[in-house]
Image (cartoon, helix red, strand yellow):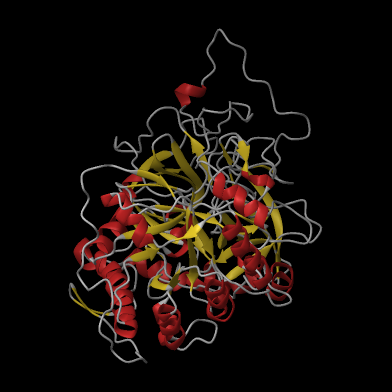
Amino acid sequence: MGALRRTLGSYGGLSILSILAPVVILMSCSRVAVPGPAVPAGGTTAGGGQMAAAVGTPVAEEGASLAPNSLRMAVRANTAGGERVAVGADGAGKGQAGKSLIATAAETATPESEEPPPPPPAGLEGQIVGGEKAAPGAWPWMVAIKAFTEPGYHTFCGASLVASSWVLTAAHCVVNASPEQIVATVGDYRLDSGQGQEVGVDRIVLHPRYGFDFAHDFAHDLALLHLTEPVEAELVTLLADDTLQLAAPGTLGTVIGWGALSESGDEGWLSYDLQQVELPIVSEEECTNSMGRMITENMLCAGYSEGGKDACHGDSGSPLVVPDGEGGWQLAGLVSFGIGCARPSFYGVYTRVSQYHDWILAQIIREETAEEREPTVLMLPAVYSDAAVILLPSVHNGPIEQPTRNVPGKPPPIPDGWIRKVQVPILMYHYVSVPPAGSDVYRQDLSVSPDRFRSHLQALKDGGYTAISMYELVEHLNQGTPLPEKPVILTFDDGYRDNFENAFPLLQEFDMTAMFFVVTDYIDAGNPFYLSWDMAREMQAGGMYIESHGRNHASLRNRNDDYLVWQALGSAETIEYELGVRPRFITYPFGHFDNNTIRIFESAGFWGGVTINPGATHSTDNPYQLKRVRVRGTTTPAELLYLLELDW
């Protein structure tokens, strides 16, 4: 069972992996291909949307982003929505492109005229990175989750039945999905057997703090799914404050799931038979020493320092249970993320259920109507009165100035009726500084040193590239306004202080413009790691663009209208108040967005949205899903130029 995630990408037959530095965070859900249109329970054909995670194979089309685990594979490239890969397995678990890993009983039944599939290779049967097959019926509350968020593909995760109509899983498994796209199968043992009760989902309740903790991407990684009808099955008991000793360090817990049998996926991306593995609970201190800053008190770690046993790809949301001393089990953790699968020196990381015991029960016992419940599901940072939202005031530090461009309410250039496509690479930077000693893998991967950034700018200049803004891109797409021969757009996410101290002077030196996407609440709070409004004013006066990255760097997917309005208008009006300029572009935090996000930001006067999906080709009919080229700390000037020349 798992660790972080690996996504492999190729473009036009050229492997991106040869030039992108590896990132070690892995995911635990699987994204698999299904034959023909994916049809969830209820007969609804799956629609679009972003994927929480993805299976990677050498024929992948896109890379993967830093995000919580869904398939638990090592991340190597960046994409907002996961890998677009078609992988499958036959009845024996052997990888096979184009066939569903979650096949129906009819598809997998062996015709009388055919021989049954061969058994797995010796030494692999019953293994899940050091575990064994679970006995039929041993875990009656185990649930398989399939999210059909895109035609021909679905994301696979594990879950637990915690009430007759409620399933508990990892938030990153379902943050990309809408309820009608999810199917839960309760009481299954073998995925292709047709066992278990298949039920639809009519409500997704993400934990209200999921996506809010910028310092810990995997924080509060849990979600409840409300089933369309109750099921009759044994429930799992939640570990609570009065039973914490059951999950003390050193205790042997058991992880259950259908995840991969190895990190490489050589034995198939999913195990058809339910697997289990015993792992010792690890102290928070020991886990932090191994995993770094990413660990919080709301997480639980398990595994062996020597490796050999772990959860793996496809296990996200699956349960870690501990014996209650009376022949039963209590749910202690949910598979969240890790580094590889069963690697030495690293542990699997789980959402610590006891920390959320009261919140879980509160959701289950609620009796509000859907109308009453909708505005409170996400526990917004605002005060609600019935259906109305009263926004809490922000602190503004600078003077009000008259707008100098992009007057409030100004629409984007009116399309002239032509649908245009153009290749304009949008580079995605974060930090421009040397990571402090002991920095975790995220900080290292997102950090480009000032010297390297200078070499990037020099390479762009020598290569004949001209830095433009997204305003010029949209004007070209909508009205055909000419662009320079080799345009490029430089973007910086989050608004770190080193953008002002290191990036801004170099951009001025090379006479280049760039777009900086800031988190307005961080600036309002005077966070010393981020820009101040005075810095932003100086950068704007120097020819830079200050745009929106939301108010608080929270996910914008699966959010209600009031919340999205609060994010869109709150960030836009704050920037306009401080700088006298209305921002017109949003970069979606974590790359999380959906159709409702686009609708609200468009209505709030934004001209476009920027994703973390890899690519450089943009079209008139898709300005709210602009693709980008991710720049890593290890990206050399030659590699950067190679990425800019790709036809993607």
Horizontally, residue 524 falls left or right of residue 461, namely left
217 sits left or right of 167 in the view: right
Q: Position of residue 142 (x, y in %)?
A: 51, 48
Is residue 418 in sight in this rendering? yes
Q: Residue furthest top?
A: 113
**How many labels sit on residues?**
0
Q: Is residue 279 above or below residue 11?
A: below
| Residue closer to the observer: 128 or 402 | 402
From the viewer's side, name the closer residue of 331 and 85. Answer: 85
- Residue 484, image x, y percentages: 43, 53
Outermost residue, right side:
306
Residue 63 in sight here = no
Residue 31 position within the rendered picture, expressed as x and y whole percent measured from the top left: 51, 42
Give the percent coordinates (x, y) of residue 432. Answer: 60, 72
Residue 118 vs 573, above or below: the answer is above
| Quadrant in the picture for residue 403 | bottom left
Q: Quadrant of residue 245?
A: bottom right
